[in-house]
Image: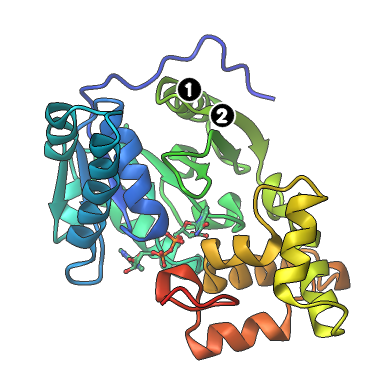
Amino acid sequence: MTDHTTATALPDSSVVGVIGAGTMGAGIAQVAAAAGHPVVLFDAAPGAAAKGKEGVAGQLGKRVEKGRMSEADRDALLDRITVVDALEGLSDAALVVEAIVERLEVKQEVFGTLEDLCGESVILASNTSSLSLTAIGAGLKRPERLVGMHFFNPAPVMQLVEVISGVATDPAVAATVHATAAAWGKSPVHARSTPGFIVNRVARPFYAEALRVLEEQGADVATIDAVMRECGGFRMGPFQLMDLIGHDVNYAVTSSVFAAYYNDKRFLPSLVQKDLVDAGWLGRKTGRGFYDYA
Ligand code: NAD
C-alpha cells in the first residue's frame, strides 16, 4: 500500500475542476470550495452546472438559517465556484475530478480530451463507483496521472473517500490525492482498482438480497427498510439508500461488478431495479423510485 504520510496536499490556491454537476459533482465542488480552492464546474447538459451551483447555494442557505455558517462565508464559498460552459474552462486546473455518467467509453473520451487541454502535471481523478481505473486510463498518454477519488453521497457530509490506484497510477499521484482529501476534512483510504473497490463490493449483497426478498414477495419495501434501520443498525434501509444513490447509477454499478467477476451470480443485477431505470423512476433525483417524493 502507498505510503501517504509524507505526501503534501495541493495548496488551497490551486484550481480544482469538476466535470458533471449532478448528485455527486455539485457536492464535490462544494467540498473543494469549502477548503478554499477556486473551483471550475462544467456539465455537458445545458444549464446543469448552474443548477448544480444553485443546489450548493440552497444547501449553504440552510446552514446560514441554522446559524452554522455566516452569510459572508457562504458568499465567499459560492464566489469560489465558477460555472463554465466548455471543457476548455478547466485548462488551468491542478486537479480535475470527473463525476459524469458511469460509462467507461464516455469517461475515457473525457479524460482523453482533458489531458490535451490541461498541463502535464494535472491530476485526473474519477469519482467512478465501480469502473476499472486501469481500463479508464488505458487509452491515455499519461495514465500515471489518473487516479480514483471516490466520494460518497452526499459528498459534503460523508467522510470516506476511496483513493483508487489502477495498474499505471503513479503512487505519488495517489498520495497527493490522499493528502488533499485529508486536507479537505475527509477520511481517505487507499485501495487498488478491484471491481466495486471496497464499499461498493461489500455493499452489493446489502442491495441484492433486499431486492431478492422483494422479488420473492417475502416482505415489502418499507418493512425491509424498517427492519434494517431499526434492528440492523443501518442509518438507511437498502431501498431508501438506492433511491438516494439513483437507480441508474446503482444498477450500472451492479452490472459493472457482475461483468467484472465473469457473471458471478452473487452480483446478478435485479430486474425490478432495471424496470425502475427503464421507467425513469431513478429515485429522489427524479421524484420517484421505490418511494414517491412528489
Ligand atoms: P448524475 O446523473 O446525478 O449526474 C451526472 C452529470 O454528468 C449529469 O448532470 C450529466 O449531464 C453530466 N454528464 C454526463 N455525461 C457528461 C459528459 N460527457 N461531460 C460532462 N458532463 C456529463 O450522476 P451522479 O450520481 O452524480 O454520478 C456521477 C458519477 O459519480 C458516476 O460515475 C457515479 O458512479 C459516481 N458516484 C455516484 C454516487 C451516488 O450515490 N450517486 C456515489 C459515488 C460515486
Task: Name which residue type carries label 2.
Answer: Pro
Task: Name which residue type carries label 1.
Answer: Ala
- The picture places residue 35, in percent across and down from the top left corner, at 30, 26
- The picture places residue 121, in percent across and down from the top left corner, at 32, 31
Which residue occupies the foreground of this view, 41 or 186?
186
Q: Which mark, residue 213? A: none
Question: Residue 256, relative to residue 142: is it above or below?
Answer: below
Quadrant including the N terminus = top right
Q: Quadrant of residue 30?
A: top left
Which residue occupies the foreground of this view, 20 or 65?
65
* Side (left or right) of 218 relative to 49: right
Element class at badge 2: strand
Q: Are discs 2 and 1 less than 8 Å apart at CB?
A: yes
For the point 15% across and 52% down, the residue is 83
Element class at badge 1: helix
Inspect this view and state whether residue 122 appears.
Answer: no
Looking at the picture, the colour scheme in use is rainbow
Tell me which image quadrant ligand 1 sits in: bottom left
Inspect this view and state whether residue 107 appears.
Answer: yes
For label 1, count other residues whose C-alpha is less than 10 Å away and answer few (under 14), some (14-19) or many (20+).
some
Look at mark 1 in the image and give the residue it sits on.
Answer: 182
Look at mark 2 in the image and give the residue it sits on.
Answer: 188
Which residue occupies the foreground of this view, 76 or 188?
76
